[in-house]
Amino acid sequence: MKGVKALILKDWKLIFRNRLLFAVLIIYPFIIMGVIGAAFGGVGRPVPIALVNLDSARPGETAWTGVETAAAEALERRFRRRAAQVSEYGSDSEAVAALSDGEVNSLMAVSAPGEAPLWLGADLSPEEISATLLDLSREADAWHEYASAEEAIASMEEGRDDVLFAVPEQDYPYLDESIWLDKENYDAYSLVSKFGQDVTDIEAYASEEKARDDLKRGRVDAVIVLPRGFVHSLKTLDEVAQVPVIIDQSNLVKAEFAETSIRGFLSRIKDGVVENKTEAVVAGLYVLVGGGDFFGTEVVGLDQIRENLLELKEALGDRPDLQEKVEVGIDLADTVIGDIEEAAAYLRGTALPIALEISSIAGRPLSAKDAVVPSLIALSILWTGVLCGAILMVIEDEEGMRIRLGLTEMGAFSLVGSKLLLATAVVFVQSAVMLALAVAVFGAFSSDILLSLLIIAAASFSCIGMGLVIAAFARQVAAAVILSVLVCFPLIFMTGVVFPLSQMPAFMQWIARAIPLTYAIEALAGVMLRGETVADVAWQLFVLIAFGVGLLTLGSLLVRRRST
Amino acid sequence: MISIRDLSKDFDGIKALAGVTLSVGKGETFGLIGPNGAGKTTLIRILTGQTVPSGGDILLDGETVDPLEARYRLRIGLVPQEPAFYGRLTAHENLTLLAGLYGIDKGQITARVADLLSWVGLEEHTARQVRFFSRGMQQRLSLAMGLVHHPDLIYMDEPTSGLDPEARLSLWDLILRLAEEGRSIFLTTHNMEEADRICDRLAILIGGTLREEGTPQRIKGLLGTDRVEAMLLEDRSAVLEALCGRLGLSWKSEGDKVVISGPELADKLPEIASSLMGSVRNLHYREVTLEDAFLRFMREVKR
């Protein structure tokens, strides 16, 4: 072990006096810790949720319901039978005008194969409207709620719905109902807001369309659509409250956070409601057994009846024939008491839940495989772009050729231009092959490959520009590689690839907005997974190109300045 | 052909060059010698456009030029201290690339590259990647790369640094052939033998200042002369006094030997030897070298 101390001291001096080594070995871990710590420091932040409350009547609005059903004709017949007088309209606009003018308070449209839909209007009583809605729900294979006539009519034109039913919202049954829970009275919005306040940041949206827009833009992480009659179904517990939830599955972690949070607090609502209800019923059943007040009526309980029968049996000691008859009564009381206890236990154990209808903003369920492809491609653009930009430039220094090339007739920007073109070609071809493999071989989803390629090209400029900037600070390829890794590694954590931006502290979100990769991931995920168009990602494309031009210019200037 | 007037360069307040003025004529081989850190490489970097000077002018054929101007750039060639080429390309590929970038006509590139490879003796190694070349071969390729566009003036920054004697001689031979072709050569070197053998004219640069300039003979003459060193068996002061007086020489004792020096010493050697015969253990004739002169100059500067 002789000389160990001297060798250790020597190595420490070597590290301490080499700025790059010192930064990589000693300082960098703290930077990474800071970046990851800051990114994950926001864990537990409320998930931003858009809440569209259809369980609230808005005066002047119409409630549109559409169903996919094989019983369209039967529903039409029942509608006609129920109404005292039915008007037929030649077109949807005529029908909608009749409803909005108050000529009728309900419309039904029935699609006929190969023909224009048949529009019927009638004035129905609240009971008849409820009965019609009940018919629809019984016959529906799928049930849809629409915020506007246009939406509902378009859906029927696309063949999604076979029957449409419209009534003014003030006439729609079960809207604006409230429910008592934990000694407080809630309507649909306040119920969800209250129970979700610990884990979500709920904002009310007037329409599902606007909420979906904000989901696409990443302003919210999920959209909850409270259906008409949501609170009513919680109160009656006679049917499952189907709650559509739209999440952005293009980021699996974000989707998971959102879904878990929503399931969590809706489950608390369900438990509360179910418990209250079942307890009330169970308590009532036990009154039947034990006696007491049963919804305002003093009831003699089965226990008391049994006691009385036992006393009667004893009193009839010398009449075995009568005793036998009393015995039957006692057995019957025992059986009923046992059945009631069983029923109470059953009620406690079963309850109609709130069911979530989870759907993806992409319009189709996405698998992990689908969701990971945009991020992988964006990371490969970052990796290859930065490394290519840096290495191709630094290689001229390492080989000592930059001076020689500078003396030739080569144009002022030929060197940078040649590097940019080659690096772009490498990044573009590599990413295009990855995309093709992901789609063709692994079956990943991409809704617009050409637009994805355009984004790849725009993103590659930015990343190559970053590489050029790095090249200005390195003279050997090895140093360029190390610097590139040092730069790329924290970016992966700061751009929402690993951890959703919405869960990061505000300052980290601002930093993420200053990193081109953030826009590349957003745009790629949008185009590949959410079916976004060039108009939807125009901003991201613009930012990527602006970053590209800026970084390439800065890199070129730094490289030229260093070489003189 | 090229003149430098009052050229200076400061690096964060440190003067790397302080008003250097010199010129290199057409067909002349000019050598810049000086210790490490004298500013030789800085001067070459300025003259090849890699570093911007703090002051002074560069004149090409009497006209002030910016080293980045094409009319200057395309007339100079460079042989840097460290060989500069793409190691994973062959010699042929390196030269072809450079010829193309210099705008040599495509039809002439092949012939030009073949000529150069033959000229530097690498014609049998055209298909090998350059990283597998010996250092000497690499430096010969580096020279060829500096000549690809027929420059009038070639800058060489310590071109034989790190070469073995055989490779050094081979490169000297090539440089002398260039000089014979009438190219102007501006080289920096630590190797005094190289400066003495190759250069028509020399300048000594110390601490960014030009101290002396002239032919190798003049520099040597300025700073030292040939001498005879003799180890004597007995005191022959009287003989030495008479001998030196007669031949116009001078003598002095240096430790256990006497040193005789003076003009045309080589011609007077037989007479010196016969005068000291019988009382001398050994006798050496030492011709002054540029290295002796340089070292003596450096000692004087330090004093």
Image: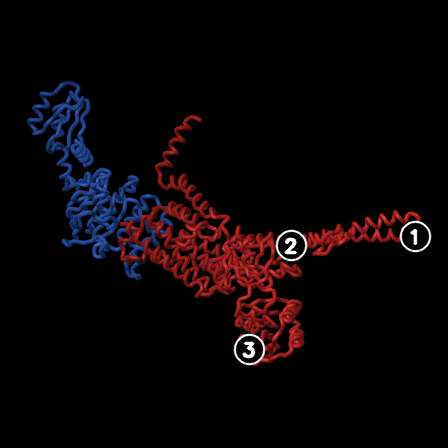
Marks 2 and 1, how far apart at CA: 48 Å
Give percent across and percent down for residue A512.
42, 52
Marks 3 and 2, how far apart at CA: 42 Å
Q: Nearer the viewer, residue B288 or B190?
A: B190
Chain ID at mark 3: A
Disc 2 marks a residue whose amino acid type is Val
What residue appears at the point 92 percent right and 52 percent down from the top-left corner?
Answer: A321
Pointer 3 or 2: first along the chain: 3
On residue A98, which mark appears? Answer: 3
Do circles 3 and 1 both sit on a common chain? yes
Disc 3 marks a residue whose amino acid type is Ala
Give the image's coloring scheme.
by chain
Chain B shade in the render: blue
Give the number of marks: 3
Q: Nearer the viewer, residue B65 or B184?
A: B65
Circles 3 and 2, Cβ within 8 Å, touching? The answer is no
What residue appears at the point 50 percent right and 64 percent down from the top-left corner?
Answer: A206
Task: Tell me the quadrant of the picture where the C terminus of chain B can be found.
Answer: top left
Q: Nearer the viewer, residue B200 or A409?
A: A409
Check disc 1: other Cα within 10 Å, few if <14, some if 14-19, many if 20+.
Answer: few
Tag 2 residue: A274
Marks 3 and 1, how far apart at CA: 76 Å
Q: Nearer the viewer, residue A26 or A440?
A: A26
Give percent across and percent down for residue B87.
36, 49
Pointer 2 or 1: first along the chain: 2
Check disc 2: other Cα within 10 Å, few if <14, some if 14-19, many if 20+.
Answer: many
